[in-house]
Image (cartoon, rainbow, N blue to C red):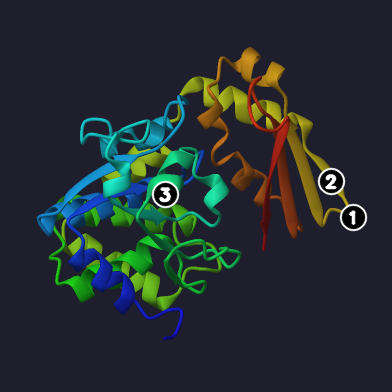
Amino acid sequence: MQPTDPSAVVEALRAGDRFVVTSHENPDGDALGSLLATQLALEALGKDSVMVLGGEAPLPGEYAFLELEARGLLRSAPPDAGERVLVAVDCAQESRIVEQALIEAARLTVNIDHHHDNTRFGDIDLVVDDASSTAEVLADVFVALGIELNHAIAEALYTAVVTDTGRFQYSNTTPKALRLAAELVEAGADVSRVFVEVYESTPFPKLKLLARALERATELADGRIVVSELRREDFDAAGAEEPYSEGIIDHLRAVDGAELVALVRELPDGASAARKGSLRSH
């Protein structure tokens, strides 16, 4: 079987009755949109499914309109996790799943992703590394499952695609991604609403945190590399929560001539590491 063949995933989703869906730590638009779309698709199939994102950190505010909490999002593994099939979306490594009890308990793990460095940690892996987003991979799975796109599924998928392609400006914006976006709009995704919620509803503390990151930005290798950092004092001074660092690296990516950008942030006390880095390249 080819690694991009969705048939094994489709069979597992059809055959299973009970599921738990999760994604990675510090979730972005693709993670949250894919998480919700998968949950809604499983519900459309009549499955018993729950969503889990471990940890206590609040979700990025720009995605509040997806109403994940109102749709039953759990922050820890359910007691019956061992009786459910685990579906991990947009998660390149199992170590990025905060709630490790899910991995340990799962009777079957389905891994759906688009990152080229995915470790294939699932019992069933569907990793399409030339896809624009995990949402694009899921859209093909939904077609194979015969799931009709309603407004909620379409808007969740559209949110994932538009954010992971940088509003259709990054090099992963393929003809297929654009065709999918059109199909999602036809199915009810509200382009204006998603744009306003994600890109024009920035909390002031996040703006202040961005200012700190830009102030610390440094050019290396004749401007081909741009590096910045965020210290705990920056979060404290801005009054910013941890998720507010999401998306800041994309502002560094906009620097003229930058081929590689990096953002290193100091993690809160009690985290598994002292610092964490993010990289982006053109």
Q: In percent of the image, x 32 and y 65: which residue is there? A: 138
Q: Amino acid at mark 3?
A: Ala
From the viewer's perspective, is the residue at label 2 or at label 3 nearer?
A: 3
- CA gap, disc 1 and disc 3: 34 Å
Find residue 35 and report its horizontal and vertical position in percent. Answer: 33, 49
Please give left or right for residue 67 compared with residue 246 in the image: left
For the N terminus, the quadrant is bottom left
Tag count: 3
Q: In percent of the image, x 31 and y 32: which residue is there? A: 74
Please give left or right for residue 233 compared with residue 114 in the image: right
Which residue is label 1 attached to? 222
Q: Amino acid at mark 1?
A: Asp
Q: Which mark is residue 219?
A: 2
Front residue of 186/97: it is 97
Q: In percent of the image, x 57 and y 63: which residue is there? A: 119
Q: Is residue 201 visible from the viewing direction of this image?
A: no
Number of residues whose C-alpha sits closer than 10 Å to that of mark 2, classed few (under 14), some (14–19) or many (20 or more) = some
| SS at circle 1 | loop
Callout 1–callout 2 Cβ contact below 8 Å: yes
Front residue of 240/170: it is 240
Which residue is label 3 attached to? 31
Q: Amino acid at mark 2?
A: Glu
Please give left or right for residue 135 compared with residue 211 in the image: left
For the C terminus, the quadrant is bottom right
Seen in the picture, residue 117 relative to 33 is either above or below; the reply is below
Number of residues whose C-alpha sits closer than 10 Å to that of mark 3, classed few (under 14), some (14–19) or many (20 or more) = many
| SS at circle 3 | helix
| SS at circle 2 | strand
Of pointers 2 and 3, the one earlier in the residue sequence:
3
Front residue of 95/156: it is 95
Of pointers 1 and 3, the one earlier in the residue sequence:
3
Q: Residue furthest right?
A: 221
